[in-house]
Amino acid sequence: MVGGIGIMNIMLTTVSERTHEIGLRKAIGAKRRDILLQFLVESTVLSLLGGLIGVALGWGISRLMGQIQFGGSTITPVVGLDSILLATLFSLAVGLFFGFIQQPGQHVFSQWRRCVMSN
């Protein structure tokens, strides 16, 4: 949730700062959905990278915990492929959802549309 809110704020700032780029792309023939797709891909990639870093850190910490002795016995960590895929898919979904949603009642599309319509 916290990562999603961060992505939402980053995308709001990104759209606001790129009004000239949006206008230029629109002037050379880019369609509205192409510009929206660019921002959604950016938010998804950002979220995916964060998810993969989280999976790598989780796997590393679980390996470290497997090396520590607790009362004479060790813990055998098991990180399954299904857990990794679920975490990765969830991070992708968060990126898509929060890349599109901006604030309650508003989303990046409305901000993006204001930029496109003004140029």
Image (tube, rainbow, N blue to C red):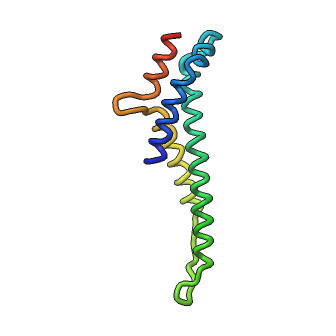
Front position in the image: 90 or 60: 60
Q: Up-down: is 84 above or below 75?
A: above
* x, y percent for residue 99: 49, 35
> Residue at 58% across / 33% down in the picture?
41
| 21 relative position to 113: left or right | right
**Is 78 left, or right, of 113 in this rendering?**
right
Instruction: Name the spot of residue 88 as percent of width and height, x first.
Output: 56, 50
* Outermost residue, right side: 28
Q: Position of residue 74 (x, y in %)?
A: 57, 83
Q: Quadrant of residue 77?
A: bottom right
Q: Residue at x 58, y 14 (%)?
A: 23
Asked which quadrant contains residue 19, the reply is top right
Toward the viewer: 72 or 91?
A: 72
Q: Say which of 18 and 76 sits in front.
A: 18
Q: Nearer the viewer, residue 78 or 47?
A: 47
Extreme residue toward the left, this view: 105
Most distant residue in the bottom direction: 72
The number of discs equals 0
Q: Is residue 76 above or below residue 111?
A: below
111 horizontally vs 105: left or right:
right
Who's the residue at 58% across and 69% down the image? 62
Residue located 52% across and 26% down the image:
15
